[in-house]
Structure formats: structure tokens, C-alpha cells
Amino acid sequence: MGHLSVKRRAFFVTGTDTEVGKTFVSEALLILLNKKGLLTAAYKPIAAGCELTPQGLRNEDALALQKHSSIDLSYDEVNPIAFEAAIAPHLAAQKLSTDNTAQLIAIDTVREGFVCLLQKKPDVLIVEGAGGWRLPLGIDFEGNPRYLSEFVVERNLSVILVVGMRLGCLNHAVLTAECIRNDGLKIAGWVANQVDPNMPYLDDNIASLKTLLDVPFIGSLPRLETPADAGAYLDLSVLDL
Ligand SMILES: Nc1ncnc2c1ncn2[C@@H]1O[C@H](COP(=O)(O)OP(=O)(O)OP(=O)(O)O)[C@@H](O)[C@H]1O
Ligand SMILES: C[C@H](N)[C@H](N)CCCCCC(=O)O
Ligand SMILES: [Mg+2]
């Protein structure tokens, strides 16, 4: 399908931490966008925590994103860099190297996979990071730390920030937003995702974040059965599609 009126957009979904709902929100966005008849694709360039199957390493985030991409994508197209261990990816890479020396995750592979997905011309491409904004790729040959965020900056992606609502999230959210802005990027919107089902003063925390972040608010997700139930809570109009 694809509508001529739609600008092709790529969003990078980051979070205040690991396990805050980046995949849950990415799935919810894909489901909503698909319902609007948009062509979608999804990308999880780096995944740590995979099952070894006869087909190769498989990560559950990447499988979920693959399932919700309306464009038919192979697993490797969705997730080109996969590690079995559920640890920081650059450490997983390091553990794999025979001499255990520092190993840099290839940002070129991240770049190439992204270009390959753009060539499929999705209306919207959802890219899920790993961990939080400053996910390390390792140390380069000159001794400099490298980060996944460099790729996001290079491509000038619109960032969606998922805040895992629990005590401590105000600091994490403000620091993350400050860092993204200092990197020169715009935050297209943020989602308050309830990771602590019993967070005291949830609404007050969300109200505080609206002021502190000063970023378009996409919505607040309570604990839900599945991402397919998230539609009523998310306002995509803030994303300028
Ligand atoms: N609003 C929600 N309602 C119910 N379950 C949720 C919600 N948000 C997240 N979850 C569940 O919490 C867990 C962590 O969420 P998710 O996997 O999306 O986090 P993540 O930020 O993508 O983590 P990672 O850094 O490993 O990629 C998952 O089991 C997910 O299904
Ligand atoms: C294994 C986990 N679920 C994620 N895929 C990777 C999280 C990396 C976090 C790195 C860090 O910031 O400490
Ligand atoms: Mg995830």
C-alpha cells in the first residue's frame, strides 16, 4: 500500500534502562501503524540474550519485531548482530573472541542493515536499541569508547524515549533526555510505561516528567496483557507522521 502523503520516517526507540518496555512499545507502535495501513519494518541491530536454534541465534525481541513488520523480513534483516549471552553486548563480543581481547561491535554492520531496510521503502521503520541510550559498542583501536548512539546521531533518527515508571525513573529520564539533546537529536515523543505495577504516585511522577522532559507525550501504558491492547493509550499524532 503506502500512502503518498506519508513521509518516510525512521524512529529509534530508546529507554531509561534495559527491561523498561522498549520492545513492548515498539510492538504496540507497529501494530497501530499497521492498522493505519502503513508499510512498516523493524530493526533490532544488536541483540544480546538469544536462543541457539537450528536456524541460528534467535532473540525474542527481534522475533517479536519481525512478526509485527508488515514488510516481510528475514530474521537476519531484522537482527544482524546477535549474541547468546544476556549480558552487555560488547562483553558478549569480547567473550567470543578467542584471546578475550577487547572486541568492538561493528557499527558498519548496524549501518548496512539499516540501509538494507530503508531500500524496502517502509513508511515507518522502527529501530529498537539495546539497553539505554549510551549502549557501549566497545573500545576502538585508538582507545576511544564507541556507542550505538553514534549511529542514531549519524542518521539523525527521531528518538522515542520509553520511561520505565518506577522509583528512580525521574533522574534516569532527565539524564537520558539531556544526553540525547546534547548529542544534537530531537526527541519525537516519550511513553510512560508502568514497569512497577504498584508505583506510588504514578500520576504525579508522570506529571513531573511532562514538565521536566518538555517532550511531546505519546501516552502512558498501564500493565497490559499484550502490546495489541496498547492502542487506546498511545497518541501517534504527536509523531508527525
Ligand atoms: N505495559 C506493560 N504491560 C505488561 N507487560 C509489560 C509492559 N511493558 C513491558 N512489559 C513486559 O516487561 C518485560 C520487559 O519489557 P521489554 O522486553 O519490552 O523491555 P526492553 O526495554 O525492550 O528490554 P531490553 O533492554 O531487554 O530490550 C517484558 O516481559 C514485557 O512483555
Ligand atoms: C540482555 C539485556 N536484555 C539487553 N538485551 C542488553 C542490555 C545491555 C545493558 C548494558 C548496560 O548499559 O549495562
Ligand atoms: Mg527489548
Image: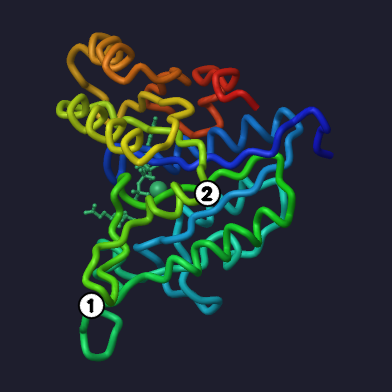
Sequence-earlier tag: 2 or 1? 1
Pointer 1: what residue?
102
Residue at 81% across / 32% down in the picture?
A: 3
Q: Is residue 88 above or below residue 172?
A: below
Q: Amino acid at mark 2?
A: Arg
121 relative to 237 in the view: left or right: right
Left or right: residue 43 versus residue 216 is: right
Figure label count: 2
Residue under the point 43% across and 65% down: 107
Could you say which quadrant of the image residue 35 lies in?
top right
State the image coordinates of residue 110 (x, y, percent, origin top left). Answer: 49, 63
Q: Disc 2 marks which residue?
A: 155
Q: Tell me where residue 171 sits by quadrant.
A: top left
Measured from the top left, where is residue 231 in percent x and y? 56, 23
* Vertical comparison of 105 with 65: above or below: below
Which disc is residue 147 wearing?
none
Residue 218 pos. (x, y %)? 47, 21
Task: Work out whether 178 lies above or below 57.
Answer: above
